[in-house]
Amino acid sequence: MAIELKNLNKKQLADLIARAASRSRELDVEEMDKVRADVRAYARTKGYTIEQLFGGRGRKGRRKAAPKFRNPADPAQTWSGRGKRPRWFHAALRAGRKEKDMLI
């Protein structure tokens, strides 16, 4: 399937490049899925699971981030600085406190 590139205009060429890149990513994903399946099957033949071999630390196994900020009004409330700011943090900022004042 030869494509004569000289006959393509710039838009057609950009479209061809985008489709080729997309197909390349699809092939990579398919290959990785095959490899994962092969590794799981091999581990099963040896009597192990992937979690046993590699610790089962995926997205769900991530450690919780350490607290970075503490609520001055209630020291039991902390925030790691990740994700949405808690209400107490916004309230403290509105009250005139600075972020550095609430650092742990």
Image: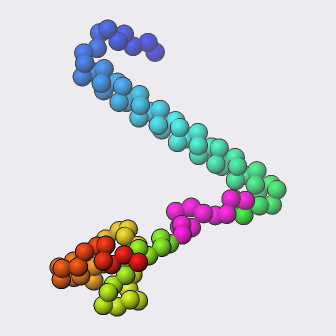
Q: Residue at x 23, y 79 (%)?
A: 97
| Residue 2, image x, y percentages | 44, 12
Depth check: give the residue in front, 57 or 35. 57
Q: Which colouring convention does the figure follow?
A: rainbow
Task: Count the numbered circles shown.
Answer: 0
Horizontal side, residue 94 vs residue 34: left or right: left
Q: Residue at x 35, y 12 (%)?
A: 5
Q: Residue at x 33, y 78 (%)?
A: 102
| Residue 22, image x, y percentages | 41, 35
| Residue 84, image x, y percentages | 31, 71
Report the residue that reaches farthest toward the right: 46
Q: Residue at x 28, y 14 (%)?
A: 8
Residue 5 visible to an observer of this rendering? yes
Task: Indicate the quadrant containing the C terminus: top left, top right, bottom left or bottom right.
Answer: bottom left
* Above or below for 36 versus 2: below
| Residue 101, image x, y percentages | 30, 77
* Above or below for 80 versus 32: below
Depth check: give the residue in front, 13 or 74. 74
Question: Which of the 4 image quadrants contains residue 96?
Answer: bottom left
Question: Which of the 4 image quadrants contains residue 14?
Answer: top left
Q: Which residues are magenta?
A: 53-63
Question: Which of the 4 image quadrants contains residue 67?
Answer: bottom left
Main SS of residues in magenta:
loop
